[in-house]
Amino acid sequence: MPEIISCSQTLIISSMTLRSFPSLASLSATAAQELARLAKESIAKRGRFTLALSGGKTPRALYEILAKDYSTVIDWSQVHLFWGDERNVPHSDLESNYRMVKESLLDRIEIPLENVHAVPILMEDTAATVATRYAAVIQKMFGQGIPEFDLILLGLGNDGHTASLFPGMSEHEMNNGVVIATHSPIPPLERVSLTLFVINNVRNVFFLVAGEGKKEILKAVLTDAGNADSKYPAARVSPRSELVWFVDETAMS
């Protein structure tokens, strides 16, 4: 088991825990260990660990640590991987969240192909069609009703978006079913995302936030955290279980 790198500061605010780290490397190392702990507990209790992954730059370091240090520590045969959101581009595209995870994690661990539940994208499909198809993939695993993932990894956009839920979306749009099509203000424009309804039913939520460019939006989101009417989708994340923010010192400054 890799050595845990302790965070420099931990704040517990209501049901939210905020953990500050000196660097993205130390943040990622601790997040990896916490993820491995949850995986072990979930497999022992329920026989599987269901994890919804995040795209973007920040989680890549976490995935690389998981591939390097946890390839045998985690029982990947009992892990089921999903995606919290995806761009409506081919899996081979440089903008694909799936491609990033494949390069940093999937190609470097032994996980059954049937345990990797990528967003099913065909070039001729609209994001709405992809969203419907992906909802069926999720419901095949969890059954009808609200899926209950063991853990979802989330990031924080400079505008306060998370997954592919963007400011300006109505309450109905963000909670309409299991998976929805959304429109990003920056390319790739067409996205699919788990709904806020699903995110708030997850057992554990890890936000991963790093970089000086995130400090203003982080402050705004944390100030508004738990506000169901917030203009920031990230601030509306309020799971019924554990919410942990892993933040590096440059974002906290």
Image: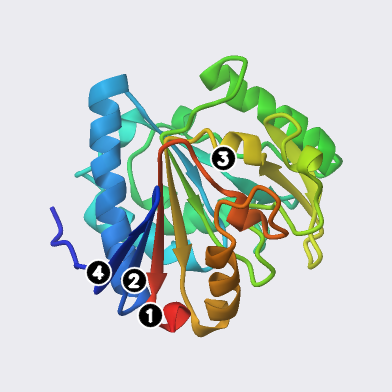
The disc placed on residue 240 is none
Is 147 on the left or on the right of 229, as rendered?
left
The disc placed on residue 199 is 3
Is 135 on the left or on the right of 63, as rendered?
right
Q: Amino acid at mark 3?
A: Ile
For image coordinates 46% across by 74% down, the residue present is 210
**Place of residue 105 in the rendered image (x, y in percent of width and height, measured from the top left):** 41, 53
Closest to the observer, 14 or 95: 14
State the residue position of label 2. Answer: 20
Q: Kindly indicate the quadrant of the structure image that contains residue 20.
A: bottom left
User: Going from the N terminus, do you reach mark 2 or mark 3 first?
Assistant: 2
Residue 122 appears in the figure: no
Mark 2 Cα within 10 Å, few/some/many (few <14, many 20+)?
A: many
Q: Amino acid at mark 4?
A: Cys
**Contact check, label 1 and label 2, Cβ < 8 Å:** yes
State the residue position of label 1. Answer: 249
